[in-house]
Image (spheres, rainbow, N blue to C red):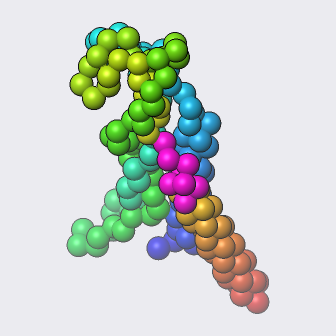
Amino acid sequence: MGLFTGINTSTSALTAQRLRLDLIANNIANLNTTNTGQTTPAGNPIPYSRQMAIFTTRPPEKNFVSLFKDARQTLNSEGVQVKKIVESDAPYRLEYDPNSPDAAKEEELGVPVGYVRYPNVNIVEEMMDMISASRSYEANVTALNASKAMAMKALEIGRG
């Protein structure tokens, strides 16, 4: 474990939580987007779908020296990274409004004629996710500051 491992781990988590907050903001901004420009095979507009980030552990960075270390040593992960961004498979909210330009013109499975499909974004769920992401971000800032303080103390000890 190197001097900057804690800082690198916190930095990767900060980046991941920032992306998560960006996705939440995008979901809230598109809360009422009933037409994304795409259509179903029946010709009905497709609404915005909620997006979520899937995280995974980030493999440690390998440098020249680490390649020659003991082969029995297991390398731990050093942080988090975004594996992929997925769209929610939750059903769209239906609302009857036959006068809307985004109302279904052709009946298809689960969408009768005259109904408008609204995004599968739930504002309460988004707000809960936003609070969670904000708190995770704050916790990682605290961890980053603690790592930085420890590194500074180590440098002071080295000065004598």
Q: Residue at x 47, y 73 (%)?
A: 1
Q: Nearer the viewer, residue 99 or 109?
A: 99
Height in image: 47 above or below 85? above
Horizontal and vertical percent for residue 124? 54, 54
Main secondary-structure element of the magenta-colored stretch: helix
Q: Residue 38, can we see it? A: yes
In this view, the residue in front, 158 or 45, is 45
**Relative vertical location of residue 108 with respect to residue 8 in this rendering, above or below:** above
Q: Residue at x 54, y 27 (%)?
A: 33
Name the spot of residue 130 as percent of width and height, x first: 59, 56
| Quadrant of the drawing holding the C terminus | bottom right
Q: Nearer the viewer, residue 27 or 152?
A: 27
Instruction: Give the magenta range.
Output: 121-128
As drawn, 74 above or below 154: above
Residue 141 image-quadrant placement: bottom right
Magenta region includes residue 124 = yes
Total numbered labels placed on residues in the image:
0
Residue located at (38% from left, 59% from top): 57
Residue 142 shown left or right of residue 4 in the figure: right
Q: Is residue 93 left or right of residue 15?
A: left
> Hey, which quadrant is residue 95 in on the image?
top left
Magenta stretch encompasses residue 71: no
The percent position of residue 22, horizontal first and vertical second, equals: 60, 44
Relative height, residue 4 to residue 127 (above, below): below
Q: Where does the image place residue 69, in percent across and percent down from the top left?
A: 33, 68
**Would residue 36 be seen by someone viewing this image from the given angle?**
no
